[in-house]
Image (spheres, helix red, strand yellow):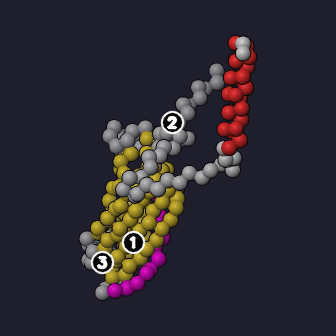
Amino acid sequence: MTTKQTAASLALAAVSILFVGLAGAAPTQGPQAVIVQNPATSPVPTRDVDERDREYFSTNIQVDCPNQFDCHTNFVEIPPARRAVVEWISCQATVPTGSAVWMAVGRPPAVGYLSLTSLFTSSGTDTFSGSQSMKLYLDHNDLSTGPTRAFVSINVFPFTSTASSAHCVVSGYLTDAVQPMPPRPPNS
């Protein structure tokens, strides 16, 4: 057998093995689902590639109102050149029986209000609850060099000397603030 014949035989054998190997492989059935089963204590890290500047937050807030009409608690600091966007608020409030109550979230001039529904009355107090999705844009106060704080407040009417309280969850994100366009120069 010549060198050319040996090389040709080896090449034919290699091609035959390749085709036999491919023919024995199971055909794919289109896209396959990926299943991730991490425990809640070790979540899969994710990243929003479309909105890289976003910092998401979800915070629990306790607002205690001892003997006052309106009390508030700060829940997020808005650094300079940033904007907080509140997307969700959920609250449960306990107030003196017969009182009306509403919740506010934000920082002036942007304030969102949450209507609460009466759940039950017990031992001289009424319990209210409410949840709402929203898009509330809270910009940094340009007059301040430090962070600006956004708040959640409980408002009770009529005023009584009995304490009120609320537990709230606020969710949203911090993002880069949109810079306003500079003023146009006057036409000459």
Query: In this orientation, does residue 151 appear?
Result: no
> Who comes first in sequence, dot 1 or dot 2?
1
Q: Residues within 10 Å of mark 2 (few under 14, many from 20)?
A: few
Q: Which residue is mark 2?
A: 179
Is 95 situated above or below 65?
Answer: below
Residue 78 vs residue 184, the one in the foreground: 78
Q: CA distance from mark 3 to mark 1?
A: 19 Å
- Horizontal and vertical percent for residue 45? 44, 46
Query: In this orientation, does residue 140 appear?
Result: yes
Tag 2 and tag 3, C-beta contact below 8 Å: no
Element marked by disc 1: strand
Q: Which residue is mark 1?
A: 92
Tell me where the magenta segment starts and ends, as one range. 110-122
> Who comes first in sequence, dot 3 or dot 1?
1
Residue flagged by tag 3: what amino acid is it? Thr
Is 42 situated above or below 159?
Answer: above
Q: Which residue is mark 3?
A: 160
- Side of 36 relative to 69 (left or right): right
Q: Which quarter shows the N terminus?
A: top right
Element marked by disc 2: loop
In this rendering, the label closer to the viewer, 2 or 3: 2
Residue 143 vs residue 23, the one in the foreground: 23
Residue flagged by tag 2: what amino acid is it? Gln
- Horizontal and vertical percent for residue 61? 34, 62
Q: Residues within 10 Å of mark 1 (few under 14, many from 20)?
A: many
- Side of 20 relative to 88 (left or right): right
Query: Which SS does the magenta portion mostly show?
Result: strand
